[in-house]
Image (cartoon, helix red, strand yellow):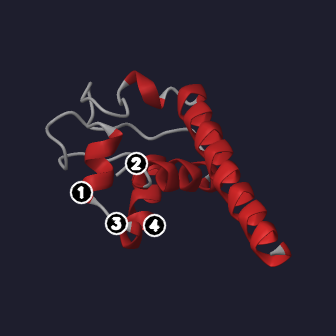
């Protein structure tokens, strides 16, 4: 019985850590002005983050991190995404969060 209780506590900790990480990533997106052109569930200038999550998988993570840092054009229409002032770690945090929004 004790092992089940410990397992449940560990699972709850993982779930709450995931929620905190998502909140941190959303706050990072806001602080880096990503939400000026993107929203979680609707297209603004760029695609919604849910549309991005539905188009790509974790195997595309490195490519997406590079696009966040360097910018890109043509994938979602004629408006280019400019380079962003983020570290590779910040870009990775954003991409992991976006891909989790399926």
- Indicate whether 33 appears above or below 59: above
**Closer to us: mark 2 or mark 1?**
2
Q: Residues within 10 Å of mark 1 (few under 14, many from 20)?
A: few
- First-in-chain label (2 vs 1): 1
The x and y percentages for residue 27 are: 61, 31
**Closer to us: mark 4 or mark 2?**
2
**Closer to us: mark 1 or mark 4?**
1
The x and y percentages for residue 99 are: 41, 55
Residue topped by disc 2: 101
Residue topped by disc 4: 62
Q: Residues within 10 Å of mark 4 (few under 14, many from 20)?
A: some
Q: Residue 64 lies in what quarter of the image?
A: bottom left
Horizontal side of 37 relative to 89 (left or right) equals left
The residue located at (27%, 29%) in the rendering is 42
The residue located at (60%, 27%) in the rendering is 31
Q: How many marks?
A: 4
- Indicate whether 90 appears above or below 8: above
Q: Which mark is residue 55?
A: 1
Q: Residue furthest front?
A: 1
- First-in-chain label (2 vs 3): 3
- Indicate whether 87 appears above or below 38: below
Residues at circles 2 and 3 in contact by the CB criterion of under 8 Å: no
- Indicate whether 86 appears above or below 41: below
Horizontal side of 3 relative to 79 (left or right) equals right
The residue located at (26%, 24%) in the rendering is 44
- First-in-chain label (4 vs 3): 3
Q: Secondary structure at mark 2?
A: loop
Residue topped by disc 3: 57
Q: Residues within 10 Å of mark 3 (few under 14, many from 20)?
A: some
């Amino acid at each position: 019985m004790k092992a089940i209780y410990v397992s449940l506590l560990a699972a709850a900790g993982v779930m709450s850590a995931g929620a905190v990480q998502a909140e941190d990533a959303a706050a990072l997106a806001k602080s880096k002005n990503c939400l000026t052109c993107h929203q979680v569930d609707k297209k603004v200038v760029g695609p919604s983050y849910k549309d991005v999550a539905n188009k790509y998988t974790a195997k595309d993570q490195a490519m997406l991190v590079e696009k966040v840092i360097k910018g890109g054009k043509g994938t979602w229409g004629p408006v280019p995404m400019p380079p962003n002032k983020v570290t590779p770690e910040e870009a990775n945090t954003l991409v992991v969060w976006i891909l989790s929004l399926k």
